[in-house]
Image: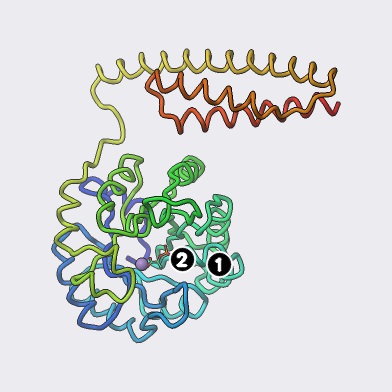
Amino acid sequence: MENKNFRSWLDEMELNHPLVIAGPCSAETEEQVLEIAEELKNTDATVFRAGVWKPRTRPGSFEGIGAKALPWLQKVKEKTGLLIAIEIANAHHAKLALEFDVDILWIGARTTVNPFAVQEIAEAIQGTDKIVLVKNPINPDLELWIGAIERLHKMGVKNLGAIHRGFSSFRKSNYRNIPSWQIPIDLMSKYPSLPIINDPSHICGNREGIFEVSQTALDLKMNGLIIETHCDPDKAWSDAKQQIVPSRLVEIMDELKVRKPRFEKEESVSALNALRKEINAKDAQLMETLSERMLIVDNIGKAKKAANVAVLQNSRWREILEKVTKKGDEHGLSIGFIEKIFKAIHQESIAHQENIINK
Ligand code: PEP
Ligand code: MN
């Protein structure tokens, strides 16, 4: 892999299928590692992943085999031709990874949150040609994610990429880490040439959701998938619930639809352009309506100021929300969507009236 450009390597591969990184959450024994790798050899996977040092929430659980597992991974490379990938969390891990010629190093979600740790790693691998992937931080903070990528870039790390593994949330959800797709979408718009790999395993926290999350990632034009794979997932020493067997990986890859990046036929391009014109006209109408609405909001603000009345009128706000969600529902719009839009409108209206009242 030395001296290879990550982007062009992906582009070549994407003609057939997206990049697939697969392997166990943790390297457990030499036999386990080699058995999984042998099975993966006959799949779409080109890279073998295995955690060697494991960041665990509570002490006392399995914290990884450590450096002893690195020769096992070298064996994987020799025997199967798969490239190898591990997580690094400090300068010591980073140096060992380079020493053992690991092809892809990734920075875990718990490390991305810490600029000191990221800086230390960046300095340890300064100027490397190795592929370095930065997982999103645990909390939904795009700037922190970008900051970590920048630290590596500044230290001359050339083959950079990102991994979207979802975000921790106090809200109850079906995901272990909610995907908040808009955050990786914002990252992709800001850095269109930065490859981004999706990690459905850590997003789902279970086996059942892996296909659907992977399909969404491909529909958003993400460049690859990192999927935890184990020959006996129930007995895995970490993340047992979310690992899948290699044969399931094959099924998933067969079922996934890799769509074309753009329309190709002349007729579909012009049909699409006509529809896009209609959307643009509707967006312009929406802007006009919103600005007219805001003018009325401002007039109400002035009336509140004249009468010395508080900006927030809770019962009126409840009445509006009830009306619009009912109306939205009649028009086939989901309640959650309408609530989100109107909460944003209400917040902006309050800010406007606050301005008026305090002028
Ligand atoms: C992992 O990939 O096994 C891992 C620990 O992931 P994350 O940093 O996303 O929690
Ligand atoms: Mn894991």
* In front of the other: 276 or 359: 359
Distance from the alpha carbon under mark 1 to that under mark 2? 8 Å
Report the residue marked by disc 1.
Answer: 118
| Mark 1 or 2, nearer chain start | 2
Indicate how the structure is coloured in the image. rainbow
Which of the 4 image quadrants contains residue 231? bottom left
Q: Give the residue type that dot 2 points to.
A: Ile
Whether disc 1's CB lies below 8 Å from ligand 1 is answered no
Q: Position of residue 244 (x, y in %)?
A: 22, 62
Of residues 80 and 335, the one nearer the viewer is: 335
How many discs appear? 2
Q: Of helix, strand and loop, which one carries label 2?
A: strand
| SS at mark 1 in the image | helix
Please tell me whether residue 318 is drawn above or below residue 179 in the rendered image: above
Front-most of residues 304 and 80: 304
The quadrant in which the N terminus is found is: bottom left
The residue labelled by disc 2 is 107
Find residue 26 and report its horizontal and vertical position in percent.
Answer: 32, 74
Residue drawn at point x = 77 percent, y = 29 percent: 354
Asked if the residues shown at circle 1 and circle 2 are in contact, with their CB atoms under 8 angstroms apart, the answer is yes
